[in-house]
Image: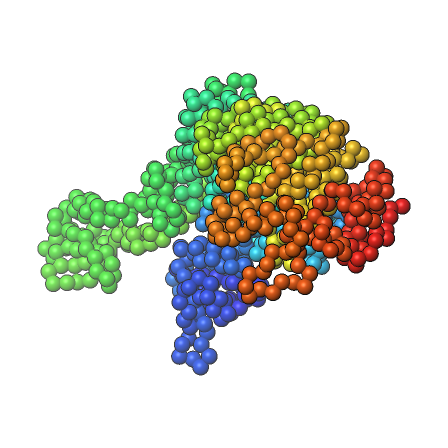
Amino acid sequence: MMVQYHRAKSAHPGAVLLFRMGDFYETFYDDAKLLARETGVALTSRNPADSDPIPLAGFPWHGAEPYIAKLLRAGHRVAVCEQVEESAPGRKLLERKVVEVLTPGTALGDSLLSSDENNFVVALRPDGARVGLAVLDISTGEFRVGDLTREDAALELERCAPSEVVFAEGDREWSETLATKAGLSARVFRTSLDAWRFARERSERLLLEHFRVVSLEPFECDDLGPGVAAAGALYEYAREQKQSAFGHLRPPVRIRVESHLALDEATFRSLEILESMPGAPRGATLLGVLDHTVTAAGGRRLRSALRRPLVDLSAIEARQSAVEALRRDAFRAPLRTLLGSTGDAERILARLHCDRATPRDLGALRTTFAAAPELARLVLVHAGESALPTPDLSAIAPLHDLLQAALVDQPPTSLVEGGVFRDDWDPELSELLSLARDAKGWIARLQEEERARTGIATLKVGFNRVFGYYLEVSQSQASKVPPHYQRKQTIAGGERYLTPELKAFEQRLLSAEENQQRRERALFLELCTRLREATAAMQELARTLGELDFLQTLAESAARHGWVRPRLTSGDSIEILSGRHPVVEAAVGRDRFVPNDTRLDRGEDQLIVLTGPNMAGKSTYLRQVGLLVVLAQLGSSLPAESAEIGLVDRIFTRVGAQDALARGQSTFLVEMIETSRILRHATARSLVLLDEVGRGTSTYDGLAIAWAVTEALADPAGARPRTIFATHFHELARLATPGAGIRNRNVLVKEWGDEVVFLHQIGEGSADRSYGIQVARLAGVPEPVVARAREVLASLERGASQTAPSAPPGLVPDTAPIDPSTGPSTGPSTGSEQLDLFGRPEGAFVRALADLELDRMSPWQALALLHRWREDLAGGHPPSHRPD
């Protein structure tokens, strides 16, 4: 046995080997120590009396999934070594082999996966400027492949959020860089393979053989290079892990990043589409508001759609029409009931092909097939002109009849439990079941039959442990014993006999349970084979059910909340009347949420400079606009009075501040990286949402950057994406000149003495105050601190005092204190100048500024010049650099 163990372990040295021993999975040596540490099972030893005992830890095989789940979450690979032959008399050592290797990306068990989320494993292969990317969900058979730019590859990685990344050993460093760019956690499982597995010609041959085609042209993948290399390597890796022919693998779909609204990791995080911000309630997301799905496939479909909203106008309108049809209660209510009765056919099919299906899985398929005819009738009656998918019953009806005739009403969770098939399904099994259940009845019948046949009224059937069943006849009746009776034992008062029939019965009875299990297993495998032959039909049914559930959840959200259908156009105008933030409204209630209008285009309303105090709702408004666009291009209704949305190709956000400490990046660096991405990649069809760009550094630097970014986004020669820029730099309001396409908006407040009331309404014009002290008071800052802040603010605003406020006792002021009446100096100063960056102070810098030819300068030249001037100011020198 230990020779078997070492052979299996040497073939999978990097995995925790679960070695089947009867009813237990056992681990040895370092694996046993690891298992005990990660799962809490007891650590013992195989041979405790030896001087060098073998560490041992294990758990029952029928309860393995929770332990495997803990190992996978801890980042370990798990190899499962099973007994692959049945025990028999005289056989002491059973053959064992590894039947599957489990990783986070290749797991199939229900307890190892989230039912309503895809579980993707991806493969990466660089080739010059291109990146080959293959994406596979083993649990559903979904398979995608593409040749992408590095930027698009990072975006697609963000979209699929894989559980595992596969790459060639020589590409490890490159792959880690791309994974980091895509925002993948360091905890995402990594697997390296030999580079020869990624050979393009080899990969293509593997794919052609599997799909039984002569060219990849039908899949629109024949012109792919590194993408095909990655796809073939990924397919082979997954097939080897599961020891399966992978008959449920769907033909590859080409990845076309431009066919969906691009939402990068920063946008997903900022808009809280799938996950809430740290500290927020877990369900405070767009997904949480929309998710009224009743099937696992529908939940996965909803998440996939949220990651990939549409950009094709006709596809969006078709989805809107389907949602409108489903808003009728007479359609949606019975549809939800029927869908809720179905099972997860996609994942059951994957387990069928990987020999992991259970009797209960087949029972769930039967229930699913039973619901299909009524689902089809509902769709045909209520769909109208909408393009709703309809279940195809041609192949499903025979499958339902097959399962209905074969399976008991409540199939067991495991084949080992027995009792899977109906009594009349198989004559041989029926006899075995009858024999096991009715042994006493059979004995009684035999006894009566033999009495009648021989005329021996006292004949009886008995049993002992020495030679089993026998026929006993009294001495007085011995002359009537038939010739075929074989005398076995003489006792006082009689004789005991055997017959061939009785011995055959005994053998059948003693081996009935074993034979029953063997026969049930053979029948179960035969049933699974027949189901696998209808893979395409079952996949189509599963896709239809998931799509219907996804569409009805959009309709359910619209009906529950009173949302309206937006009008999508190919123009550039975004007009939303009385729009509301769907997540905030769900939390506070519609009566308490203040709606707001939005108008954006690429003309006079191309860029909104949004000012107002903290807590007034600027960030909420930015997120609201972004979420309403996502909903519109999802095909959903919107929380608004009316809306017209000009199609958006990508949403860029810079909302909220988060350090990326794990990457060694500060808040300001993250802000600048994301801002740089926006400036480089925004197009004329993009939507840009910026919140407080520049606040992470000094006032001068921050204002300079915010000013230059605003000019770049509104540059007539540039892309001019539709933009909302929320800021506390009120000076930006001066950019809203006629013809610039920039509008000033502010979040309205109401002052009442020393109090301030946030109205949460967007109004015309710019705010002139930030109300920071009032916000500090509302936040609970101690009153003495608030009072002192008011004094300093009043002094700064009056500009009357020439001396700094006295330092509190115990504090020593700097040698060059900041004068609260003048603010920070712009150079060598006597402290008599009030800070006004855009005012009219005298001096060389003002003259230099007046000499600038701004029309000939780019925003980045202006930013560089400001940076050099600041250095001159710090050194007390006049401006020494002028633009060419």
Q: Relative to 15, is 404 above or below?
A: above
Q: Is residue 118 left or right of residue 487?
A: right
> Foreground: 645 or 102?
645
In the rendered image, the residue lying farthest to the right is: 884
Q: Is residue 450 left or right of residue 37?
A: left
**Residue 260 locus on image (x, y percent):** 65, 35
**Residue 262 locus on image (x, y percent):** 65, 38
> Foreground: 139 or 147?
147
Q: Relative to 328, is 763 above or below?
A: below
**Residue 253 locus on image (x, y percent):** 65, 38
> Foreground: 690 or 93?
690
**Residue 860 locus on image (x, y percent):** 79, 45
Q: Residue at x 43, y 42 (%)?
A: 361
Number of marks in picture: 0
Q: Is residue 873 left or right of residue 509?
A: right
Q: Residue at x 46, y 32 (%)?
A: 592
Q: How is the image coloured?
A: rainbow
Q: Quadrant of residue 320?
A: top right
Q: Relative to 434, is 31 above or below?
A: below
Is any part of residue 192 visible from this angle?
no
Q: Residue at x 83, y 53 (%)?
A: 878
Q: Relative to 510, is 312 above or below?
A: above
Is any part of residue 126 visible from this angle?
yes
Q: Residue at x 14, y 63 (%)?
A: 491
